[in-house]
Amino acid sequence: MSKDLTSFFKENYKNKNLYFDEYMDNCLYSKFGFFNTEVVRSSKEGDFLTSPEVSEYFGLIIANFINEKINDGDILEVGAGTGSLAEEIVKHVDKNLYLLESSKTALANLKNKKFQAEEKLEKFSDKNIDIIYMNELLDNVPCAIGVNKDDKWYEKIINTNKEKFEYDLAEIREENYEWIKKYNLQPMEGIELEIQLNSEKLLNSFIDIFNPKYFLIFDYGYEYKDRDKKPYASLIRTYKEHHLSSEPLELPGETDITYDVNFTFVEKYFESKGYKVELMLQTNFLDKYGFENIYKKLKQNYQKFSDIEKLKIKSQLVGLEAIHNERGLGGFYTLVAEKI
Ligand SMILES: C[S@@+](CC[C@H](N)C(=O)[O-])C[C@H]1O[C@@H](n2cnc3c(N)ncnc32)[C@H](O)[C@@H]1O
């Protein structure tokens, strides 16, 4: 895999800049990309475990949110992965659920499971979508990298002409510079900036087509005011088989390239589009929409039932605790945007 992508980059970017977002896009979503190989990556057999894979109650709690917020209208999940979350949501919500998934492997699997799933958003343009939700999607949307030197912004590019790929700096593209200014992201000494213009474009396409009442977004991330507390120059990292992996340029197509989402940008984005935004930790979202009741009931059942049942309930309790624990998945951010 890696060899195919390496020669693709070498041939196509001999005489033009390869910006990091283009590199990341190809590494994840091209024919030879990470998300288009045999396994669905967000599964036990894959490379990382997400909240819906860890606990079925993540879906139940999101269903509680949906049922509280809307009476009619349909729902769209973006980046549905294995479909575990969707499977739980449809058990508890009596509305049409549509899935968007750009990985061909994952899409085929979702269609096998009889979901209404598509790769292209336009396929759903006649639907009346009131809630769009996504878990661990934005951290996989290709970003560019801004570097500030002597008060001037540059962009990281990848030099593919040497034996090993290397970073270089180039003049920043105008729209990326505008993005930094728009969100007033001041440079910080020794810190690179993940430029999430592609996320903005993706969110724009949802609003343009559906103008939904709600967005519900879960992901790992940070607020820009706290950026300097993170001890890394770059927030970009890679995963392979459930472990942190190599430097992003080392194994193109073989690792998941991801980064912490800048929730200050996401918050400002939705406010600028006429949404009221609530930003909280995942643990607080779970508390707000029913964690305590579910947890108590499981504990009571644990006391009541026999050995085999006990084992099952124990594993459900462990999963529920894992998505709630602030030092783990519970420490992720949840953003609720409501159209005003
Ligand atoms: C980290 S996985 C998370 C999967 C699932 N949401 C979960 O929580 O287990 C990200 C998923 O988003 C998909 N994806 C990335 N960009 C997308 C886009 N623009 N539209 C639809 N799906 C996308 C990827 O193919 C991948 O399956």
Image (cartoon, rainbow, N blue to C red):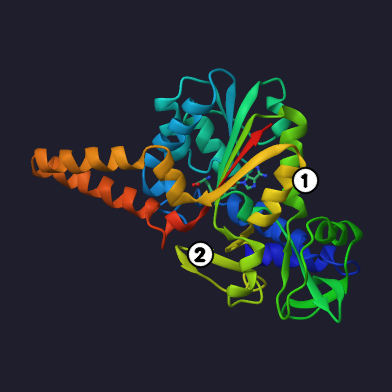
Q: Viewer-proximal residue, 134 or 47?
A: 134
Taking the image as shown, residue 333 lies to the left or right of residue 249, namely left
Query: In the drawing, what numbered circle is on residue 316?
Result: none
**Residue annotated with mark 1:** 201
Which image quarter: residue 148?
bottom right
Taking the image as shown, residue 149 lies to the left or right of residue 64, namely right
**Horizontal and vertical percent for residue 172?**
88, 67
Determine whether the residue tagged by mark 1 lies in a helix, strand or loop: helix
Q: Is residue 162 above or below residue 194?
A: below
Q: Quadrant of the N terminus?
A: bottom right
Q: Mark 1 CB in 8 Å range of ligand 1?
A: no
Taking the spot 75% from the left edge, 48% from the top edge, the residue there is 200
**Horizontal and vertical percent for residue 50?**
46, 51
Taking the spot 62% from the left edge, 26% from the top edge, the residue there is 130
Q: Nearer the viewer, mark 1 or mark 2?
A: 1
Determine whether the residue tagged by mark 2 lies in a helix, strand or loop: strand
Q: Quadrant of the C terminus?
A: top right
Residue type at mark 1: give it. Lys
Q: Closer to the N terminus: mark 1 or mark 2?
A: 1
**Residue annotated with mark 2:** 240
Q: Is residue 318 above or below residue 8?
A: above
Q: Residues within 10 Å of mark 2 (few under 14, many from 20)?
A: some
Q: Viewer-proximal residue, 293 or 83?
A: 293
Residue type at mark 2: give it. Lys
Q: Residue furthest top?
A: 72
Which image quarter: residue 265?
bottom right
Q: Is residue 327 above or below residue 288?
A: below
